[in-house]
Image (cartoon, helix red, strand yellow):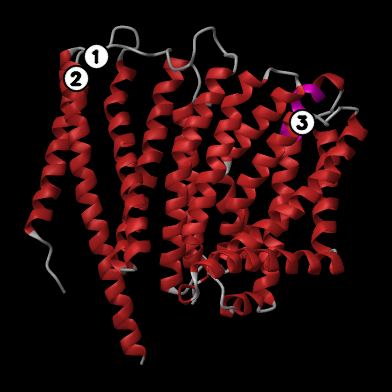
Amino acid sequence: MAEKQAPVAKSSNFIKAVFAIAWKDLAAELRSRELLSAMLVFGMLVILIFNFALKLDAKTRITATSGILWVTFTFAGTLGLNRSMAVEKDRGCLDGLLLAPVDRSSIYFGKLLSNLAFMFIVEAIVLPLYSLLYNVNLFNPGLLLVILLGSVGYIAIGTLLSAMAVQTRTRDVMLPILLFPVIIPVVVAAVEASGGYLQGMDISELRYWINLLLVYDVIFIAIAFMVFDYVVEE
Amino acid sequence: MNKKPVILLVLDILSLVFLAVAAYLALSYAPMEATMGNVQKVFYFHVANAWVGMLGFISAGVAGIAYLRSGNPKWDIVEVAAVEISLVFFLIAILLGSIWARPAWNTWWTWEPRLTTAAITEMIYLAYFMLRNGIEDPNRRARFSAVYTLVGAVSVPITFMAIRLFRTIHPVVIGSQSAQAQGGFNMSPDMEVAFFFSLFTFTIIFADLFWHRIRLGNLANKTEELKLKVME
């Protein structure tokens, strides 16, 4: 479909389609607020449970904070990813999107953007809340960079796998089982780098982790871009 | 019904004979390792099993890409065969490793990069089979599992690097030496003979099992087709 158009129109159409899909998700979410509220409440509950599970006194907090944050983001993120794809599938929106005369990968990038936006909103609320509750200063530019890179990697592969998971019989449990074994590099690198920044380590010591996150992001966005067609094809 | 090829039969017999020879070489021909004693013998088979696991892992990745490119269902059968063999042999390698690690490292398990990566690979394989079980449409099942194999094949090496980085940067908590150095040794020529023969044997066993499993997959497909025909 897209091949027939002139190359100039094609690239601008592609970007337009990506933003249209992302905007559709955000607009729907702004009206219903069911996804964000679920992710947020869930995220707060995870932090609350960690408080009792790990007895977060001042000493433990220094070492455990980055781990707790990433566990919270990972779990809340799964909830969001599952829901965002399930909505498309249940209401038949996915078929509509597939019929639209746009490149299939623009659907992937559109969903990627909206999922990423939800993730960032949750993080933007969880971080100050955690700072407030546990008296840890989390407003560190290095940490924010790590969270940005980690979230991109997580959502890049999560969007692809959630599109697969919703089409299986056991869809609600399928996503974490598929997703968690393949995002271990993101979790390892993100936890280490965030922990390093929180403990005031030098950037040169954490460079490897940042590089690893960057490499992971690039590789998995590229893979998802290449194979997304096979996942949504009927 | 196609008959079992003669070469496959030869491979079957070779696998059995070589396995017996490899066992003899490992258990009796290779000299006793000075510090670890008998338990070191497990090493010959442990490495060979992990090797087969690796071969299966790589074959699965290649088959996954080939399926996505060609859409030919035979690659799906190859992919499942490779994943199944790799799953079993990695599991054996992990168990044998644990048996060796108990006396050598004084623990059944440590979060060493190779161990952890093998365990995560097993998790990816289990997820792979759960994914396959959850999809009824054969075309979609083949497509999704090929995509997941590809994702797994790319993520496992990155995981290995990440965990190795994690280990080298981290202070060593247990013991003063690194876990990798503990239980290291140099092979004598006799040991090398036993070791490489064992690797060779398990490569033959891999080829044999792989072929069998692909044949089984083809036959299962044929049965499925016949069943559908009867039902019509």
Please tell me in which quadrant of the rendered image residue A209 appears.
top right
- For the residue marked with disc 2, what is the amino acid? Glu
The answer to which of B156 and B17 lies nearer the viewer is B156
What residue is pinned by disc 2?
Answer: B192
Q: Residues within 10 Å of mark 2 (few under 14, many from 20)?
A: some
- Where disc 3 sits, the SS reads helix
**Which quadrant holds the C terminus of chain B?**
bottom left
What residue is pinned by disc 1?
Answer: B187
What is the spatial separation of the Cα atoms under label 2 and label 1, in whole angstroms?
6 Å
Residue A62 on the magenta span? yes
For the residues labelled 2 and 1, say whether their Cβ atoms are less than 8 Å apart: yes
Are the residues flagged by discs 3 and 2 from a single subunit?
Answer: no
The answer to which of B84 and B18 lies nearer the viewer is B84
Q: Which residues, given as a range, are shown in magenta?
A: A61-68
- For the residue marked with disc 1, what is the amino acid? Met
Please tell me in which quadrant of the rendered image residue A187 appears.
top right
The picture places residue B27, in percent across and down from the top left corner, at: 21, 23
Residue A193 on the magenta span? no
